Image: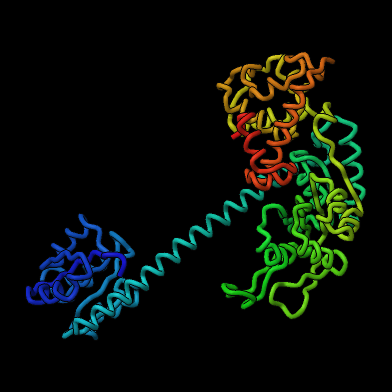
Amino acid sequence: MKKRYRMLIVDDEPSNLKKLKRTFGNEYEIFEASSAIDGFEILKKRKVDVIISDQKMPDMTGIELLKKSKRINPHIVRIVLTGYTESDDLIEAINEGEVHRYITKPWNPDELRIIVRDVLEKVELEKENRILTEKLKLLNERLRAENYILKREVDEFFNEGNIIFKSEEMKKILEMASKIVDVDTTILITGETGTGKELLARYIHNSSKRGKNIFVPVNCGAIPSELAESEFFGYKRGAFSGANRDKKGFFQLADGGTIFLDEIGETPLNIQTKLLRVLQDGEVWPVGSEKPEKVNVRIIAATNRDLKKLVDENKFREDLWYRLNVFRIHIPPLRERREDIEVLFGYFLEKLSKKFNKRIGGVEDGVLKIFKNYFWPGNVRQLQNEVEKLIILLPDGGRITTSMISGEILEGDGEKRGEFFSGGFNLKRELSNFERSLIERALRECNGNRTRAAKMLSITRQSLIQKLKKYGIR
């Protein structure tokens, strides 16, 4: 036994106490009492895992003691020693769960040890199951809450009559998207990181006839290549070592709804072949299965890379590219639709001040000017993160000032530097800023993996490390 359990033995006969102590002393930490009253006092002061009590005692019966022990700790293993198995009190206690086991006298030490061990294991398993059930319940409640919050956020951002934009570019995108929400065709959304590709995909899904069914987002670049096939298409029991049950893949989970394949350009070539089969035939082939399974799924893919260039480099299948590129929507970066910066700034300011319960006493004039001039390499996501930081730093009722803005944004502000947006041009500095933003973006895309980021940037890992030191990027 890995754990050294604590046991209370109660008997008014010294010889029985001695025998019980000899039986369990090597495996358990023993507390002993010669009466039920003394035993109850020990229970109030000590944490006990097991009670073995004699039934017939002068001051209080063993069953009465076990009932009281349950009130102190309902998970104590309760065992009674008795010579009277026909006792009504004993039968009632067993039926009501007051007693786990009764042992008839005279008892065998080896048999008693086995019985106690078995009861302990059973109680421990029941305890673990309760804990796991509670954790699962909490997890389900959290997921429901997160889904509700996310749906509200999506509805707020992409909801008819309440779409956060001012630019003509976004107006055209939403008009285009609204025309194909109920046309069950494959959609490819392109655009830089943080422009809102997943939000647009969710908007299309929620507005469509599939909106009541599930939306399954998949980050294709985050799945290890050796697990990709089973994650995408599932597997059958016995397909490989450890496959002790059938498991649904992303496509089976999305059946009847929409699957969003984010960063589709990162998908391994062997999976691209199988994706093509899903697009052509509406079938997936689980690992270890002898036949394909039909799925009814709408596919929306997204990428921040040039898929045509990947095709030319033999890194992406040309036939899959044509299948995905049926209806393409490109979301321009925030710097190309600067009219949206002001309305998004106001929207996030209001939303996040409510979230953090902060009153805003005003915004300094220069703040919005800096925001409008900045390049925003991280697009809307970076803008939201910056506003969130401002709200967190803001004292309740305080005023947002330019001094609170992040250094990288202040340094990149065209008006402050007299470059780029104000008509001046410092090539060396602009190239350095651009190189730094590309490196930071590649690292974000690769979740901090330097090897993958270097490969994305077409430089060696050592060169990337040198540039990280040069720009002080952690």
Residue 282 is situated, as x and y percent measured from the top left of the image, at 84, 68
- Which quadrant would the N terminus be assigned to in this image? bottom left
Is 91 rendered above or below residue 210? below
Instruction: From the viewer's side, name the closer residue of 147 and 170.
Output: 170
Q: Quadrant of residue 317?
A: bottom right
Q: Return the x and y of residue 182 as percentages of the image width and height.
A: 89, 55
Mark count = 0
Position of residue 328 in the picture relative to residue 231 (left or right): right
Residue 375 pos. (x, y %) = 77, 27
* Residue at the spot 64% in from the left edge and 22% down from the top edge: 407
Residue 113 rendering spot, x and y as whole percentages: 24, 78
Please, is residue 262 above or below residue 53 in the view?
above
- As displayed, is residue 106 above or below residue 57? below
> Residue shown at 73%/31% (left/top)?
435
Q: Nearer the viewer, residue 466 or 243?
A: 466
* Horizontal relation, residue 206 to residue 70: left or right: right
Residue 311 can be seen, yes or no: yes
At x 83%, y 51%, the residue is 310
Nearer to the camera, 122 or 415: 415
Looking at the image, can residue 353 be seen?
no
Quadrant housing the C terminus: top right
